[in-house]
Amino acid sequence: MLLNFPNALTCCNLICGCMATGSAFHGHFTWALALIICGAVFDFFDGMAARALKISSPIGKELDSLADVVTFGVAPSAMLFQLFGIVQYPEWLTWATPYLPYTAFLIAAFSALRLAKFNLDERQTTSFIGLPTPANALFWASLIVAELPWLASPRFNALWLFLFMLAACFLLISELPLFALKFKNYSWADNRVKYIFLCGALLLLIAALVTPLGLTALPLIILWYLGLSIAVLYLH
């Protein structure tokens, strides 16, 4: 029974991803975001459970990647697909209206590439190289829910959405080193960057509760994570 517990959590992640994809295709963006967050929670605890129970198996590793492709690749792609049908199109780009939404599934493809690289890359044991797929999924899902009126307004358009999506695809498979929230100890000297990030994220979450910032805090936290990682890279 205990041997299958981590895999059961991984399957819960997969089910959340499937439900998020279905919700996205029906235009229920808030539900899709909630289910992606639930999937991320299951994704966190399946690894924790495997380590606590000292269970490691090839099937668990493969199952985890397959679940992540759905929850953090296909589900945000489905949300972007729907968004491409809502955003404004410049007059010169109206010919692409029936076709451009399908480019949203580049996110799913590049997420799969990111996960395949992660499984084979021995450099990513204590940090990441390239944007993690959960961070990318949470960025797009929370941005769409929080800023849908702005994204669908004339101040934004399909070309900008396409370019930002390409930037996200590049970040997923880039060689950009990013810190991971993994602690070997809790000293300030060894975890300074992580504590700075957590303090900034906490301030954004507090601002979300006491100001009109709301869910916009979530994509801002992902941007804060990226910006801090880049700053650390250049300062070193």
Image (tube, helix red, strand yellow):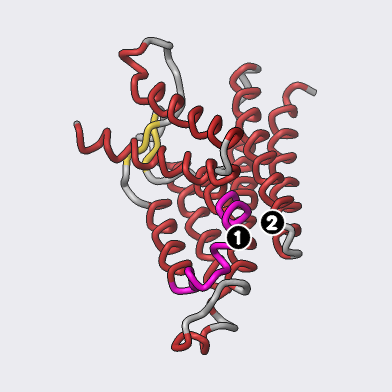
Rendered image quadrant of residue 153: bottom right
Residue that mark 2 sits on: 29
Q: Amino acid at mark 1?
A: Leu
Distance Cα–Cα, label 1 vs label 2: 9 Å
Q: Residues within 10 Å of mark 2 (few under 14, many from 20)?
A: many
**Residue at image point 45% right, 18% down:** 183
Rendered image quadrant of residue 86: bottom right
Tag in front: 1 or 2? 1
Q: Are marks 1 and 2 in contact (CB under 8 Å)?
A: yes
Secondary structure state at the residue bearing disc 2: helix
Asked whether 222 or 153 is in front, the reply is 153
Residue that mark 1 sits on: 148
Residue 57: give x, y in percent of width and height. 61, 31
Residue range corresponding to the magenta coloring: 142-159
**Residue at image point 64% right, 56% down:** 75
Residue 62: give x, y in percent of width and height. 60, 42
Is residue 14 positioned above or below 77 on the image?
A: above
Residue 97: give x, y in percent of width and height. 56, 83
Q: How many marks?
A: 2
